[in-house]
Image (spheres, grey):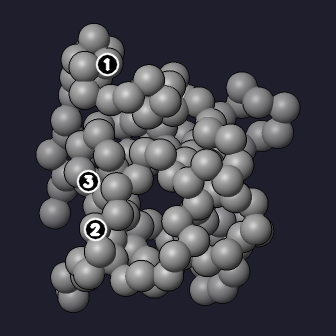
């Protein structure tokens, strides 16, 4: 199932998002570690705060000790888009929302099994829906 894109101008996003959310999603910013790590263990789905696209499920979240919410796989293969990010001093792969194309965080290859990926995501751009489950396919 292809995801329907949600495209807005920066001016429109500014009206919807808080300045901190806008900075992360539209300007590729990063929140300070420990801002919003979602340390409470509850079952549910993490959605994009801007467009409500489901991004990650609680069962794939793990304690990375970094201070950012960390997951080992996305909700579905087209939940997120990957983009090479060469702006920083460390070469990293940027993780972008598959629906609104907002910046979410980065993915690294030092995660736990089964994927060995570590999706390091800004908690401020996630909306947690408690009790929601991924439909079985
Ligand atoms: Zn989104």
Q: Which of marks 3 and 1 is in front?
A: 1
Q: In this view, does 59 lie above or below 111?
A: below
Q: Please, what secondary structure does the residue beneath circle 2 have?
A: strand
Q: Which residue is drawn at 70% across and 49% down?
A: 33
Check residue 53 in the rendering and tell me which mark sits there, or answer none: 3
Q: Mark 2 points at which residue?
A: 129
Looking at the picture, how far across and down is residue 24, in whole percent? Answer: 51, 32
> As drawn, is 29 to the left or to the right of 32?
left
How many callouts does the rendering have? 3
* Quarter of the view holding residue 83: top right
Q: Which residue is drawn at 38% across and 28% down?
A: 18
Q: Are marks 2 and 1 in contact (CB under 8 Å)?
A: no
Q: Quadrant of the C terminus?
A: bottom left
* Quarter of the view holding residue 86: top right
Q: Please, what secondary structure does the residue beneath circle 1 have?
A: helix
Check residue 14 in the rendering and tell me which mark sits there, or answer none: 1
Q: Which of marks 2 and 3 is in front?
A: 2
Check residue 117 in the rendering and tell me which mark sits there, or answer none: none
């Amino acid at each position: 199932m292809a995801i329907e894109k949600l495209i807005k101008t920066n001016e429109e996003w500014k009206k919807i998002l808080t300045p901190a959310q806008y900075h992360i999603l539209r300007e590729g910013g990063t929140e300070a570690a420990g801002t919003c790590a979602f340390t409470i263990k509850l079952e549910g789905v993490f959605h994009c705060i801007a467009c409500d696209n489901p991004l990650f499920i609680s069962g794939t979240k793990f304690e990375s000790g970094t201070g950012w919410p960390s997951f080992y796989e996305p909700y579905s293969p087209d939940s997120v888009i990957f983009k090479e990010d060469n702006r920083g001093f460390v070469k990293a792969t940027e993780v972008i929302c598959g629906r609104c194309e907002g910046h979410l965080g980065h993915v690294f290859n030092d995660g736990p099994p089964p994927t060995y990926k570590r999706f390091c995501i800004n908690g401020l751009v996630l909306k947690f829906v408690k009790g929601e489950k991924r439909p079985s396919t």
